[in-house]
Image (cartoon, helix red, strand yellow):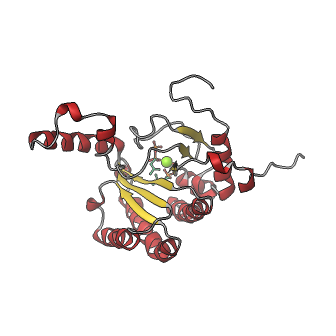
Amino acid sequence: MAKQKSWTADQLDPSRMPRHVAIIMDGNGRWAQKKLLPRTMGHRAGMAALKKVVKACDELHIPYLSVFAFSTENWKRPITEVDYLMNLLVEFLHKELQELHDHNVRINIIGDYTVIPRQCQVEIDQALEMTRHNSGLVFTIALNYGSRKEIIDTVKCVVEKIQAGQLEPEQIDEASFSAMLYTHNIPDPDLLIRTAGEMRISNFMLWQIAYSEIAVTPTLWPDFTREDLIKSLLDYQNRERRFGGLSK
Ligand code: IPE
Ligand code: IPE
Ligand code: MG
């Protein structure tokens, strides 16, 4: 049998690394189902995968990593699963915060986390406060995030500014609108990875991914490793980004 090809960091071109990698971490439930485990165990295994991917991004000097952890639509799931996910996030921050801080990681949250359990909010605020001056990897967690809600919130912000006389309609352009999105302090993703094979965006960063390269892998999120990340990065480096222009 042919030896499986391996992907290592030395195959990467350091001059063509993406600035921002965004990941739709999907497939935790299917991972658990395959192993005849409860879905919650899939989420727990997903947390372990996340820890490794954050470390890998830091080591590969990727400046921005964003992950979709909980969508505005995920409230449709059974309350027990939602609770488990929230508690898992608290646990993740609790266990990993010091190490992330030691690695100079700045934690950033997008999405309305004021509606999630109090304990969760406290943990998040501590993580934001502790890491706010860090200058390393910017690690954004999209939590109770929905891109349509973000766009609507931004439109409301625009209207309020106009009504308050702080903004003229002529001043609204792509740059000024982007500067009012939840993602105002991070660049648009260069590479969007979705695990577990689904060919859809599921309401994630609709505005921001206008020109992102998309990589869908069949690998379920809990099985996603540093090597899978490198494979996606190599794939990205083989793409030609034309932004509507012509080939060089
Ligand atoms: C991703 O895994 C985690 C969240 C959406 C919170 P899923 O829980 O969606 O796993 P599948 O898609 O059911 O396998
Ligand atoms: C997208 O996964 C949301 C997150 C990864 C947090 P879903 O599992 O919720 O997406 P759909 O329902 O398959 O579109
Ligand atoms: Mg899913």
Where's residue 104, x and y in %?
49, 70
Q: Quadrant of residue 193?
A: top right
Rendered residue at 47%/70% (across/down) = 92
| Image-based side of 184 in relation to 246, left or right | left
Where's residue 176, x and y in %?
29, 40
Rendered residue at 78%/52% (across/down) = 6
136 w.r.t. 14: above or below: below
In the displayed orientation, state which residue is furthest to the right.
Answer: 1
Number of numbered labels in the structure image: 0
107 w.r.t. 112: above or below: below
Closer to the camera in the image, 237 or 232: 237
131 w.r.t. 214: above or below: below
86 w.r.t. 192: above or below: below
Can residue 149 be seen here? The reply is yes
In the displayed orientation, state which residue is furthest to the top.
Answer: 246
Q: Quadrant of the C terminus?
A: top right
Closer to the camera in the image, 94 or 13: 13
Where's residue 33, x and y in %?
58, 54
Rendered residue at 30%/62% (across/down) = 116
| Image-based side of 164 in relation to 183, left or right | left
Q: Quadrant of residue 236?
A: top right
Where's residue 54, x and y in %?
55, 62
Can residue 8 be seen here? The reply is no
